[in-house]
Image: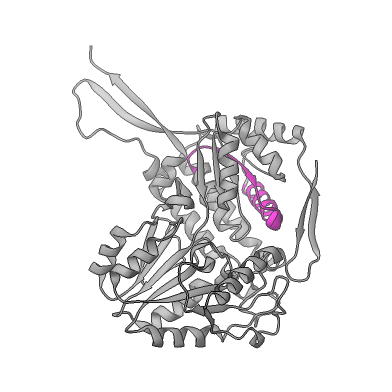
């Protein structure tokens, strides 16, 4: 056993320290999950949905405490109110549509004297490994639909947001969840890989880095345990000449710098048509200079610290590399008093004169820096947008719906946006291509990943 330690990015204090779960604790949790799931899978879907909505109510009731708690753990400013708008939207949507999405599939043709259908059976025990950047939203994507589908859930939350797992546990207990149906465990990386390699879980849902996903896959190798992976991103935006410029600037600045850029689907690179390039860059810089970097517990702060200094240092290295290769920085970090060049506080940065020889344009940054390139036409933009090992989302900013759909068909990405970015629609599959991962959450497709098909072929006349 070792200790899980959460160190605050605000001032370096220890927010929480606790021992990891023992081997006996893990075995007991898995046994309890199996026992609870045996009865839960026979529970009507409407009752499962009722429990999940009670869980939502219990979580929202704690929001006044959770919002500053999140700021202490990972630095998001309190003025943004945590994650409960999207959290509630997703849970209510999934609960509302669970019966529809999980109903048996009927063949298109009826056979006289036979009853035939495909039933969606729960997998068993789902193991969710959640990240710190959106600790409620990412976790709920698998936890609630897994329960709605009749599974039990074991949660391993990131050390940086270890208190979030506690909040999930408290809310499910307040909602009256059967004992063992949901359990959060404090696990080390080694504990996590051993648990996956044991074959004692029936699905692993992981959100994190590409390197972390590779470790998860290796751990599951030979167990035949399915693995859902949401990994890195380098999400592009293309601003066409026919854009609504003010709208695009406002939304892309927010898409690049919200949550200090610590978002898998945040905007990390922008390609702008040469006809609107100068105006776009001017407006983008003006809005960026309006951010207030500082203590996330203060209402005036619009940009908090990054969760860890090592992640901020990655952004610093990428920025320095770009400048050494000829890029130009348009933001003077001295405008942001909290940025002292080290630690977790990092000013937003806008880079121009960039190209794909620079790491900042091809490697995940996961911080408040964005590169902007001038392009001459759709073909050039498309080529550059697809020049990436990642593919989570891509956005096209235009007044031309047909053009957006045409480009979208050629974009190597999991989601195509037009005139918006950085959003998860619970009615659509959240998925990616290339090194961004595999599998899907949310929508009908997400429910399919949490169940297995069981065919019934019944002769009714002899």
Q: On screen, 311 above or below 176?
A: below
Residue range in magenta is: 148-175
Which of the image's four quarters has the C terminus? top left
Residue 310 visible in this rendered orientation of the protein: yes
In the displayed structure, does residue 437 sit left or right of residue 333? left
Identify the image quadrant of residue 108: top left
Which residue is drawn at the image coordinates 63% and 48% (left, top)?
172
- Predominant secondary structure in magenta? helix
| Residue 231 shown left or right of residue 382 in the figure | right
Q: Is residue 160 magenta?
A: yes
Residue pictured at 45% horizontal, 76% vertical: 372
Q: Position of residue 24 (x, y in %)?
A: 76, 32
Q: Residue drawn 59% across and 57% down?
A: 136
Task: Tell me the quadrant of the picture where the N terminus can be found.
Answer: top right
- Residue 7 point in image, percent of width and height: 76, 61
Q: Nearer the viewer, residue 16 or 244?
A: 244
> Residue at position x 56%, y 31% from top?
39
């Amino acid at each position: 056993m070792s200790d899980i330690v959460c160190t605050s990015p605000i001032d370096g204090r220890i927010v929480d320290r606790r021992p990891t779960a023992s081997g006996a604790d893990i075995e007991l949790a898995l046994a309890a999950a199996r026992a609870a799931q045996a009865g839960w899978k026979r529970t009507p879907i409407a009752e499962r949905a009722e429990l999940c909505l009670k869980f939502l109510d219990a979580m929202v009731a704690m929001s006044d405490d959770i919002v500053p708690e999140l700021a202490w753990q990972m630095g998001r400013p309190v003025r943004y109110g945590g994650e409960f708008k999207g959290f509630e939207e997703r849970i209510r949507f999934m609960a509302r549509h669970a019966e529809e999405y999980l109903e048996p599939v009927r063949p298109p043709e009826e056979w006289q004297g036979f009853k035939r259908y495909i039933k969606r059976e729960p997998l068993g025990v789902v193991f969710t490994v959640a990240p710190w950047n959106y600790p409620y939203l990412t976790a709920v994507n698998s936890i609630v639909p897994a329960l709605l589908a009749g599974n039990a859930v074991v949660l391993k939350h990131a050390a940086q947001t270890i208190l979030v797992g506690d909040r999930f546990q408290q809310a499910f207990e307040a909602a009256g969840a059967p004992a063992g149906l949901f359990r959060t465990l404090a696990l080390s990386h080694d504990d996590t890989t051993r648990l996956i390699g044991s074959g004692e879980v029936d699905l692993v849902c992981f959100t994190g880095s590409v390197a972390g996903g590779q470790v998860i896959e290796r751990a599951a190798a030979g167990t035949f345990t399915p693995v859902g992976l949401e990994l890195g991103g380098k999400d592009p935006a293309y601003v066409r000449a026919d854009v609504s410029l003010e709208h695009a600037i406002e939304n892309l600045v927010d898409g690049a710098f919200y949550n200090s850029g610590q978002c898998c689907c945040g905007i990390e690179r922008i390609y702008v048509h040469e006809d609107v390039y100068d105006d776009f860059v001017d407006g983008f810089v003006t809005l960026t200079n309006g951010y207030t970097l500082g203590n996330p517990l203060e209402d005036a702060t619009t940009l908090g610290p990054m969760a860890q200094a090592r992640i901020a240092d990655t952004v610093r290295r990428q920025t320095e590399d770009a400048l050494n290769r000829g890029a130009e920085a348009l933001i003077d970090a001295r405008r942001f008093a909290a940025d002292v060049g080290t630690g977790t506080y990092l000013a937003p940065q806008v880079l121009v004169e960039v190209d794909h020889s620079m790491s900042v344009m091809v490697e995940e940054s996961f911080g408040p820096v964005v590169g902007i390139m001038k392009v001459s036409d759709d073909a050039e933009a498309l080529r550059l947008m697809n020049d990436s090992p990642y593919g989570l989302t891509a956005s096209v900013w235009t007044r031309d719906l047909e053009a957006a759909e045409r480009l979208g068909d050629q974009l190597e990405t999991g989601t195509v946006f037009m005139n918006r970015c950085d959003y998860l629609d619970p009615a659509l599959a959240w998925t990616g291509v290339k090194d961004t991962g595999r599998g899907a959450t949310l929508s009908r497709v997400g429910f399919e990943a949490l169940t297995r098909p069981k065919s019934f072929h019944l002769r009714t006349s002899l």
